[in-house]
């Protein structure tokens, strides 16, 4: 981590653990080295910092390319290892930038739903993440975030002190589907992209906080 990222990371953890009474569960499931795709449900602008605050590795977040042109703010985003993309990163240039970061051994955070939930419920996964997964060789770590919608939904201006937790799942490899994607038809390839997206979303939904002992 560079100095800017380290400061932001420490402040994020402090805010998460104090104001939101937060917890991270099973952060040790995130590989310590190599390219990794974090795939999480998306309920709030709080999701990226609380997810990245669970382990001691730099996470490459996505941001609209136009934001990088804003004086000072763009410089800060670069220091935070942000990947500039067009809209949701589904374009060719955005996909190439994401794959390059993964090949360089970085961590990329993606949201299968594509956008924040409007009602707190998980939405259907879009096929875009399936394309990214198939084009890469990186493992996918599903991540479940709880509480951020109540703390700061898209309809709220200020964060509320609600409990926020993050649960990391076991890495998913998709080796068989990646192998099939190299030789299948275009129609089947589209099915594979959606299948991967659906399996990731199901894995996210299945994650629960450890039961507390009485």
Image (cartoon, rainbow, N blue to C red):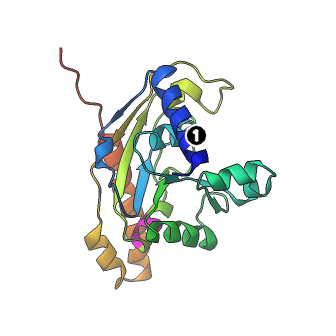
Total numbered labels: 1
Q: Secondary structure at mark 1?
A: helix
Q: Residue at x 35, y 82 (%)?
A: 184
Residue 159 position, x and y percent, is: 60, 24
Residue 83 position, x and y percent, is: 60, 60
Q: Which residue position is annotated with label 1?
A: 8
Q: Residue furthest front?
A: 3
Q: Residue furthest left?
A: 214
The answer to whether 98 is drawn above or below residue 142 in the figure is below
The answer to whether 111 is drawn above or below residue 26 in the figure is below
Q: Residue furthest bottom?
A: 183
Residue interval drawn in magenta: 130-134
Q: Residue at x 18, y 19 (%)?
A: 213
Q: Residue at x 29, y 48 (%)?
A: 29
The answer to whether 202 is drawn above or below residue 136 in the figure is above
Q: Which quadrant is the C terminus positioned in? A: top left
The answer to whether 163 is drawn above or below residue 116 in the figure is above
Residue 149 position, x and y percent, is: 53, 30
């Amino acid at each position: 981590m560079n100095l800017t990222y380290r400061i932001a990371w420490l402040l994020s953890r402090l805010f998460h653990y104090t104001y939101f009474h937060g917890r991270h569960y099973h952060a040790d499931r995130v590989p310590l080295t190599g390219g990794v795709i974090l795939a999480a449900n998306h309920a709030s602008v709080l999701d990226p910092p609380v997810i990245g605050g669970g382990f001691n590795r730099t996470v490459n977040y996505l941001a609209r390319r136009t934001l990088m042109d804003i004086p000072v703010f763009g410089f800060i985003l670069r220091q935070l290892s942000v990947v500039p993309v067009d809209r949701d990163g589904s374009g060719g240039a955005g996909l190439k930038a994401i794959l390059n970061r993964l090949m360089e051994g970085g961590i990329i955070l993606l949201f299968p739903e594509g956008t924040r939930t409007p009602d707190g419920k998980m939405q259907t996964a879009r096929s875009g993440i399936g394309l990214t997964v198939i084009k890469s060789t990186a493992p996918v770590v599903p991540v479940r975030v709880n509480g951020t919608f109540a703390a700061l939904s898209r309809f709220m201006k200020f964060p509320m002190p609600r409990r926020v937790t993050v649960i990391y799942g076991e890495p998913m490899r998709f080796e068989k589907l990646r192998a099939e994607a190299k030789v299948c038809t275009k129609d089947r390839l589209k099915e594979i992209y959606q299948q991967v997206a659906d399996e990731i979303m199901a894995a996210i939904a299945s994650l629960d906080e450890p039961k507390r002992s009485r």
